[in-house]
Amino acid sequence: MSGIGTGVREIRIRIGGAFRVIYLASRPEGVYVLHCFQKKTQQTSQQDIELARQRFRQIGE
């Protein structure tokens, strides 16, 4: 998830479907969850990536 920002990571969960959690854990004040969603296609949608990128910018990285 480096395309979203430096230090951004992804957790992949497969329980009754495919779910993703995009987060940033490199800040001393805590872990920021940028976006969580259920995947319905192989590729992550541009809308989900843009939302995580926008939230990353709001943090002020």
Image: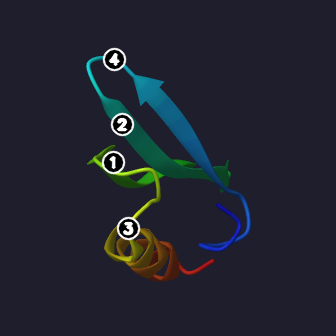
Residue tagged by mark 4? 15
Q: Amino acid at mark 2?
A: Phe
- Tag 2 near tag 4, CB within 8 Å: yes
For the N terminus, the image quarter is bottom right
Instruction: Tell me which label, 3 or 4, sits earlier in the chain.
Output: 4
- Report the residue at 41% width, 23% height from top: 14
Q: Secondary structure at mark 3?
A: loop
Residue tagged by mark 2? 19
- Tag 2 near tag 1, CB within 8 Å: yes
Q: Residues within 10 Å of mark 2 (few under 14, many from 20)?
A: some
Residue tagged by mark 3? 45
Q: Position of residue 22 (x, y in %)?
A: 49, 51
Q: Residues within 10 Å of mark 4 (few under 14, many from 20)?
A: few
For discs 1 and 4, the disc positioned in front in the rendered view: 4
Q: Secondary structure at mark 4?
A: loop
Q: Secondary structure at mark 2?
A: strand
Q: Amino acid at mark 1?
A: Cys
Q: Position of residue 17 (x, y in %)?
A: 29, 27
Instruction: Tell me which label, 3 or 2, sits earlier in the chain.
Output: 2
